Amino acid sequence: MTSGVVLSLNVGRAEPNPAKGSGLDTGIGKVPVDHPVTVRRPGPKTTGLHSGVVGDFIGDVKHHGGDDQAVYAYAAEDYAWWSAELGRDLAHGLFGENLTTQGLDLYDALIGERWQIGEQVILEITFGRIPCATFQHRMAEPRWIKRFSASNRTGAYLRILQEGEISSGDRIEVLERPGHGLTVSEAFNIYMHAPEHLARLLVADALPPKMRTEIEKRLANTAG
């Protein structure tokens, strides 16, 4: 099976959010840590523990965190692509990811793909990351939200199927790849840019339930 490694394990602390009108602190400023960190199911988005990574802060609990966005991963290979595009070095954790991975193709990872990290933790990919105003301010790049969205290099949100500890340097084993073939990049592109293909997203059982309901409603409205 395909394997990779946790190149960097990143945790964010609360800090003022510069995004206009947010009125919230943010934990997007994640930095690498050199000790094991426990991951556990955080529960519902707005009322649970928010991040799946113990000690990691999430400010906008309406749009981030919860069981279906418990952990966020971004690939070092995609960072390299962006470094070339932007003409500057990009530190691990800059995009607000908990796991900076190496050796895994997150662009072509599948919705519902399952990873084992270390000896205990099992995660499942749910969807890509939809950029927000806080991300725009952090990057300070012109039209960043549109550029990030157009690239389809979104990284992957994951839910926690089996809890445990993760450390920097842990091996990542891809345990399972669903047969539907729906990649993170294809799913994101359809959701953001190609609504005529929305029905394609429903082949993925691992899609977040709230997103599935939204898509079904959009399809019903179109049909009506």
Image (spheres, rainbow, N blue to C red):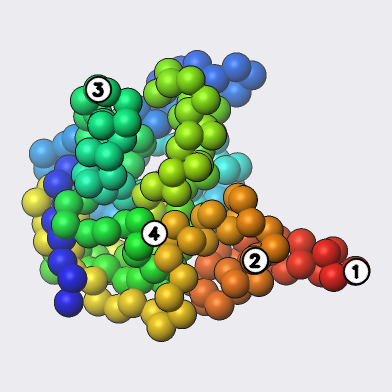
Q: Residues within 10 Å of mark 2 (few under 14, many from 20)?
A: few
112 left or right, relative to 5: right
Q: Measure how far apart labels 2 and 3 are at the Cα level.
A: 36 Å
Q: Nearer the viewer, mark 1 or mark 4?
A: 1
Residue 158, numbered label: 4
Q: Amino acid at mark 1?
A: Gly
Residue 224, numbered label: 1
Q: Measure how far apart labels 1 and 4 are at the Cα level.
A: 34 Å
Q: How many numbered marks does the figure carry?
A: 4
Q: Position of residue 41 (x, y in %)?
A: 40, 60
Q: Residues within 10 Å of mark 1 (few under 14, many from 20)?
A: few
In the image shown, does 21 or 187 lie closer to the viewer? 187
N-terminal of the pair, mark 1 or mark 4, is 4
209 left or right, relative to 156: right
Question: Which residue bears the numbered disc 2?
Answer: 197
Assign a secondary structure to mark 4: strand
Determine the residue positioned at 21% across, 50% down. 101
N-terminal of the pair, mark 1 or mark 2, is 2
Res. 118 image quadrant = bottom left
Res. 100 image quadrant = top left
Q: Amino acid at mark 2?
A: His
Residue 88, numbered label: 3
